[in-house]
Image (tube, rainbow, N blue to C red):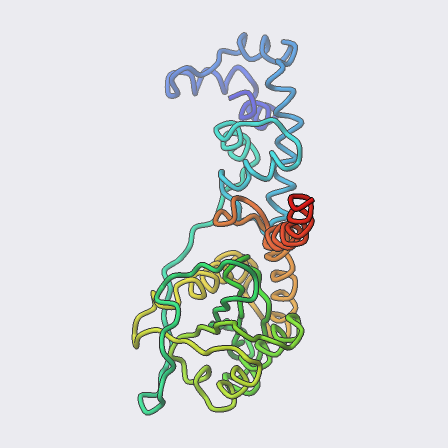
């Protein structure tokens, strides 16, 4: 109420505003109450709000403006603020920010019924004991003023890290998904022995050039049942988040190159900065770093026990 009066008193005056709105708005201030509130010493809560509201707005903007109460609360705690979840929600309202909601997914996978499909080695169990054990891959698209931009992602199930990606103006297997796979393979050192590569029934992923490359790298190809999006649910969820957090927030998009640059920045944020609820509000980078630190510490602990 005080803020409303402050914003309009130069145009209408304090007393006319209070006289008009007091009968219409239950509990509205009198002009005397307004002046008393303006001269009163700010409370500790008000002073803390003045400090935290800009911080909430800044951190929310730095994370693509997509965090809701749960992730903003975790982020504020990581920044060193002793703050509750309800207080975070109140500060977000004061800052005028809120999380984004996922939209319904439109499935566009086109399979070739004549192509022999690999067996389903995952069976909807999207869990892995460590990095480079299970990757999921999928394609989505972005409408631009110059045509469609097609985006391929390869994601490590253990850490949710996007290990390979590509943006192109074509769906051709040797251009779009194959380059994303090669990026992921390069990041893994070129040896994918024992890794399961899971994709949907899109003809891109079951073309000869793609499946031959998967086998050449030492990985085992896997796919789910026909027409069942749940059999590649994790990859579908990542596509959905990408469209929700980046594409619909920052559009409209003019060119494929603009989408490519924005996707580069988004993937970096996803891997190094975004908090993932499935990872206990940690980043993929933190999860993998912790895994390898524990792995390195295990032999040391074994030696100490023998001694």
Side of 225 where 268 appears, left or right: right
Quadrant where the C terminus is found in the figure: top right
Residue at the outermost front position:
307
The number of discs equals 0
Q: State which quadrant residue 216 falls in.
A: bottom right
Whether residue 185 is situated above or below residue 37 in the rendered picture? below
Q: Nearer the viewer, residue 305 or 170?
A: 305
Q: Position of residue 162 (x, y in %)?
A: 57, 64
In the image, what residue occupies the spot 50% across and 61% down?
Answer: 157
Q: Residue at x 51, y 61 (%)?
A: 242
Q: Is residue 220 above or below residue 245?
A: below
User: x, y percentage for residue 279?
Assistant: 52, 49
Q: Nearer the viewer, residue 29 or 62?
A: 62
Q: Quadrant of residue 56?
A: top right
What percent of the width, then of the height, locates residue 164?
59, 71
Say if 176 sits above or below 91 in the image: below
Q: Position of residue 203 (x, y in %)?
A: 41, 85
Residue 273, above or below 40: below
């Amino acid at each position: 109420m005080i803020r409303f009066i402050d914003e309009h008193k130069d145009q209408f005056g304090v007393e006319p505003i209070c006289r008009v709105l007091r009968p219409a708005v239950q509990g509205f201030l009198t002009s005397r109450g307004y002046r008393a509130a303006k001269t009163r010493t700010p409370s500790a809560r008000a002073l803390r709000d003045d400090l935290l509201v800009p911080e909430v707005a800044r951190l929310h903007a730095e994370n693509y403006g997509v965090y809701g109460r749960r992730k903003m609360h975790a982020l504020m705690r990581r920044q060193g603020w002793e703050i509750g979840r309800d207080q975070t929600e109140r500060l977000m309202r004061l800052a005028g920010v809120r999380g984004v909601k996922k939209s319904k997914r439109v499935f566009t996978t086109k399979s070739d019924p004549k192509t022999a499909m690999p067996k389903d080695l995952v069976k909807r169990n999207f869990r892995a004991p460590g990095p480079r054990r299970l990757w999921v891959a999928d394609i989505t698209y972005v409408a631009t003023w110059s045509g469609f931009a097609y985006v391929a992602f390869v994601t490590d199930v253990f850490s949710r890290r996007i290990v390979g990606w590509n943006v192109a103006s074509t769906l051709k297997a040797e251009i779009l998904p194959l380059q994303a796979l090669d990026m992921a393979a390069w990041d893994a050192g070129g040896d994918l022995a024992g890794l399961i590569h899971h994709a949907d029934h899109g003809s891109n992923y079951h073309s000869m050039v793609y499946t031959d490359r998967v086998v050449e790298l030492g990985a085992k190809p896997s796919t789910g049942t026909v027409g069942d999006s749940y059999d590649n649910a994790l990859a579908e969820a990542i596509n959905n988040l990408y469209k929700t957090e980046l594409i619909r927030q920052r559009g409209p998009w003019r060119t494929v190159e603009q989408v490519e640059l924005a996707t580069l920045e988004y993937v970096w944020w996803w891997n190094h900065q975004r908090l993932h609820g499935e990872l206990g509000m940690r980043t993929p980078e933190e999860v993998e770093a912790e895994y390898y630190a524990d792995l390195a510490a295990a032999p040391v602990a074994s030696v100490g026990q023998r001694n």
